[in-house]
Image (cartoon, rainbow, N blue to C red):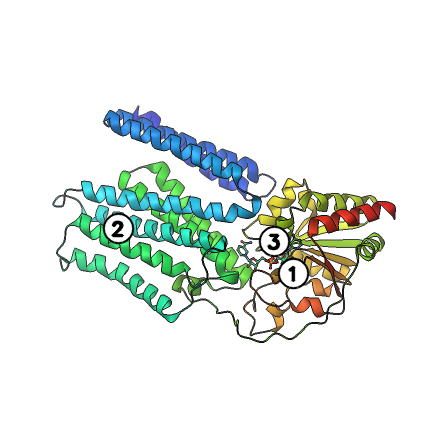
Amino acid sequence: MYAIIEVGYLIATLSFLGGLKFMSSPKNAKTGNLIAALGMVLAVVLTFMAAVTATVPYTNLIIMLLAIAVGTVIGKRLSDKVEMTGMPQLVSLFNATGGGCAMLLGLVEANQMDPFTTILGNKILLIAGLITGAVALTGSIIAERKLAGKVKDRRSKTVILSARILLGLMVLLPVLYFFGIIPIGFTAFMYVLAAIAMVYGVLFVLPIGGADMPVVISLLNSITGIATAFAGFVYGNKAMIAGGIFVGAAGILLTILMCKAMNRSLLKVLAGTFKKSKNGAVEEAQEIKEISISETALSLSFAQKVAIVPGYGLAVAQAQHICGQLQQLLEKRHVGVDYIIHPVAGRMPGHMNVLLAEANVEYSHLKEMDEGNENMEQYDAVLVIGANDVVNPAAENNPDSPVYGMPIIRVYESKQVIVMKRSMGKGYAGVQNDLFALDNCSILFGDAKSSLQEIVNQLKLI
Ligand code: NAP
């Protein structure tokens, strides 16, 4: 049985690897997700089999089965119910459960350790898993609440300083404990560390807001993976170690990519120093030009090349299907259409890719930001659908702006820009968009879905 379980863990690990490989392209991402999910099911079954063969008491096995059943039902219901726009919050919640698990494992195992015979290495692993798990637990819950708009940014010096003190304590206390300077039992010490780490998780995420949020979410994701790997080492569970390392590494890579896309330094993110928004700054009134549905339809029909830049508003309006119809209609009229995707458009990495995949937009139509920027002057018209921050020229020419330094899609370099939005509402970073006042930019006010529908109707008549 031992050999079967070990081979099974190897297969599960290979499925995680295969899943990740497939997920590196939007075309195969769904298959990748399925492969990795099957690997995870296999790992859970094998862990259960390992518990059975290790003659774990029946009551424990029943509790395990109950936990699996409850987790499956809750996970399925949440995933079925969630709207695409609520996906980042759900990911954050799932992340919190992973971190919470690693923290609880640390507490349970500490309780079972023989204080005299346990090797130091295991205690260090338990502490590392507990701290990272506890930070991921509360940090992810706060991230979820912030994304849901229920918790506001708290950027006070007290919050930032307290977070740093707690970070210091999490490093210092274990050292003091192992030198025998803290005379309490290991379990009690672990509870103290868990409490400190949970408070740190809250304080770590509280001050962060605006454009830095995606970095923090993927960082917390990575931290959960690392916590799982630590717990896997304690149990000698190879699938847990491999799965944890994959999540940790993928999370860190995504964090680095996000940092690049938002011009954030990873070191500053890790140190908890974030660019403050100049909320108090006075914004000049903008003179904007409005454009009508029929003018937009006319412009698009006379264009040779059109670019569509989708953003968060496309997801809010659920306008992806009608957007796909517009593209097909334009193509029938021999207008070339590209979608230019900003890596942090929307509210989660790959948000726009997921939406456009729902509308069966072919991958050959999707252009990455750099490619789109290189060819921007070729576009006769750029339709910005519910995007704001990711096309804000202030990121390039206003050093006082919170979005300054973030790479943007330079739609202003095209011949004509039409921005679809409902009002003069701001984007996620909460700053005015300098694009709207430019000569080649006009705004088509209205909900993206109904505006697109009307444009499609008009195009059919032209
Ligand atoms: P954005 O800056 O949040 O702007 C969204 C725009 O959509 C708003 O200007 C809004 O204007 C418009 N809008 C909302 N609902 C609409 C509707 N029904 N119809 C038409 N327009 C609608 O979006 P973005 O340009 O995609 O930028 C993403 C931002 O989110 C960046 O700052 C990024 O850093 C941040 N972020 C990204 C992630 C990620 O991983 N992708 C995660 C968290 C945060 P009106 O209200 O006037 O309609």
Q: What is the spatial separation of the Cα atoms under label 1 and label 2, in whole angstroms?
A: 44 Å
The label number, if any, that marks residue 127 in the structure image: 2
Name the residue beneath numbered marker 3.
Answer: 312
Crowding at label 1, few (<14), some or many (≥20) Cα neighbours within 10 Å? Answer: many
Q: Is residue 147 above or below residue 3?
A: below
Front tag of 3 and 1: 3
Name the residue beneath numbered marker 1.
Answer: 409
Three-letter residue code for mark 2: Ile
Mark earlier in primary sequence (1, 2): 2
Front tag of 2 and 3: 3
- For the N terminus, the image quarter is top left
Three-letter residue code for mark 3: Tyr
**Measured from the top left, where is residue 116 in percent x and y?**
11, 45
Left or right, residue 45 beside residue 60:
right
Three-letter residue code for mark 1: Ile
- At horizontal 43% and vertical 44% (from top left) the residue drawn is 94
